Image (tube, rainbow, N blue to C red):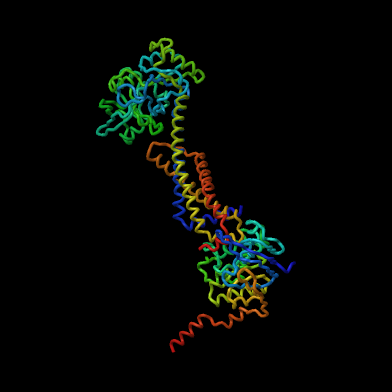
Amino acid sequence: MNQKIINIKNVTKIYKIGSVRVNALNGINLEINRGEFLTIMGPSGSGKSTLMNIIGCLDTPTSGAYLLEDEDVAKLNDNELAEIRNKKVGFVFQTFNLLSRTNIIGNVELPLIYSKGKPARSRKDLISDVIDSVGLKEWERHKPSELSGGQRQRVAIARALINEPTIILADEPTGNLDSRTGEEIMAIFQNLNKEGKTILFVTHEIDLARHAGRIVYLKDGIITGEEKISSPTNAKEKLENMPKLEDKINSIGENALT
Amino acid sequence: MKRILENIKIAFKSLGLNKLRSFLTMLGIIIGVGSVVAVMSVGAGAEASITENIQSMGTNVITITPGREQVFAGNREVRMESNAGQGGGFMVTRRFGDNEDEEIVAGELYLEDVDALKEKAKLLNEVVPVLSGFNSTFSYMSWSGNVSITATTEDYLSLQSYEMDKGSFFTASDVSNSSNVVILGYNVVTNYFGKANPVGEEVKINGKNFTVMGILKSAGSTFGMSPDDSVYIPITTAQNKIYGVDTVDQIIAKVESEDVMDQAIDEAKATLRVQHHILPGESNDFEIRSSTQLLEIASSVTDILIITLTSIAAISLLVGGIGIMNIMFVSVTERTREIGIRKAIGAKNRDILAQFLTESVVLSLSGGIIGVGFAGFVTWILGTFTTLSSLITAFPIILALSFSTVIGLVFGILPAMRAARLNPIDSLRHE
């Protein structure tokens, strides 16, 4: 089995907005190995999202090659891309992007609806196992609106996991969460990575970026640098040392009284 | 198959979230399908009862009418060419059937013509004259109202295959004596006497006293005109005491058998030509139609009526379809983000297309099904509170349901295509 699951060679992306050409990506070379936890960091407008969309097969590059598990996906049509997304990519978005009118089971089941062929195990078992793995067993019949932000993001992770994708793409998954909940989500990702899942994480916060094993810096559509993290931040340990929000509120309250 | 069920489930869920909106959208289809099915059912009912009426007389019946330049001829008040018992009541200014190219001049028919036919036309078994009047005043004690008068001879009962409920029909001597006797139709009895037995009672028709001799069993109605609404008196009484004429409106006769229909018509024609002193080469001043021809006229009239009304009703189906298209466009815009999510997760364009197409078909087909129920209700109302009888057959229901499915597909395709073509990246960003 090839270690290199993503191989991007000299990829460019040019948008035409009216008569204006916007060069979002100017020749990106990137390799991602199986089992890696990689962060892409960059300021807004650096081309992070464009790169993410291309890696996630939501978009195709203007030029260059993109091999996903040795399959050239740079020139596929809409329907072929949809199939790749369904089988090989698991998305976790900043804004969760759950179907608001469907309960947790329905949301997690969604990728299965669009996949060909039956999963080895029965759908029901598969769904309930995945929901269990993100700790939402007792919430499975609830709708997203009845859940907290952290819980919603766990549903999104469960949905991303259901089809056992080649890679999980997390686009600022903690952006809408408080720092403690964000850390909890990072702990889930680290845990998944430990189990062998390949994770691509996008952020603009250096603290969060250091949870990964490698950081790639992106600016103005090119990769400006790369950093190996020898000892990534351990989200679990950090959580233990983090004061809980209610503790903090209590202590502030006591101080105010005295 | 599983995908289709899944889509139907999604469709019902999303329609259920906007119950009022979905219902209002369906309303166009409900009204459209409802009126198409109701019109076709009432039409089918009318046609069935016309056919039944004409066939109950037998297919071996001919009707002779005087030549007329126009429908309303003569100076008697409220007269029409054909009477209700004939399954007629419609006005025919065109000539139908075999006589179409035969020119006919104005003329009259008399009781002497009846006698001549009885004597000379050997192929005719029963020859009965009819004189009819609409909106005649009928009163019993202090109650009064309007009825139709059918004036005829004693053979009318067996010719029309009507049955007596109580009492008896008038006799040949009543006819020759111009007796003031009357036989009441079923509705006349219920309207004026309720459950009481009217036989032997004195009633007034156009101010003249009549004795009730008998009442008829109900015979149903055609186009709201029914022999049940009529009263039956001897033709001579009507001629001498009510209208003051010596003519008759029509002569009905039974032919020995259907096989000799043509000869019988020729025989009757020849007899009447002699009777009316018509020279060779001159046009007839009367017209003879067989019951088959009457049936053709009746059904062509009802067909035109049904087609016209159905087309009008079908327009509201079209309007309903436009309503569906409109609401589906709204729905696609509202759910852009959902479409983006589904696409990101692996839905192909055709999956999204199928989802929204299913939704519009479910919307319009549900409207269709409710519309059929609505039509059932309307025809029930018509059947209960008016004399219109209707016949709900499978044909208009299948037609209306397949029509509403097609409407869902046709008017759903554009919104569904718009949904399917949405770009997943833009859709995910959609607020």
List x then y, in percent, for residue A149. Answer: 53, 71
Residue at (48, 55) in percent of width and height: B330
Q: Do we see residue A159 in this rendering?
A: no
Q: Is residue A71 above or below residue B204?
A: below
> Camera-side residue: B382 or B350?
B350
Report the number of discs.
0
Q: Do we see residue B427 in this rendering?
A: yes
B26 vs A175, left or right, is: left
Q: In this view, does B245 lie above or below A231?
A: above
List x then y, in percent, for residue A44. Answer: 56, 70
- The single residue placed furthest to the front in the displayed view is A19
> Camera-side residue: B158 or B355?
B355
List x then y, in percent, for residue B231. Answer: 33, 28
Q: In which quarter of the image is residue B275?
A: top left
> Camera-side residue: B415 or B9?
B415
- The single residue placed furthest to the bottom in the displayed view is A258
List x then y, in percent, for residue B287. Answer: 42, 19
B19 vs A3, left or right, is: left
Q: Quadrant of residue A128?
A: bottom right
- The single residue placed furthest to the right in the displayed view is A1
Q: In this view, does B116 lie above or below B51?
A: above
> Camera-side residue: B67 or A96?
A96
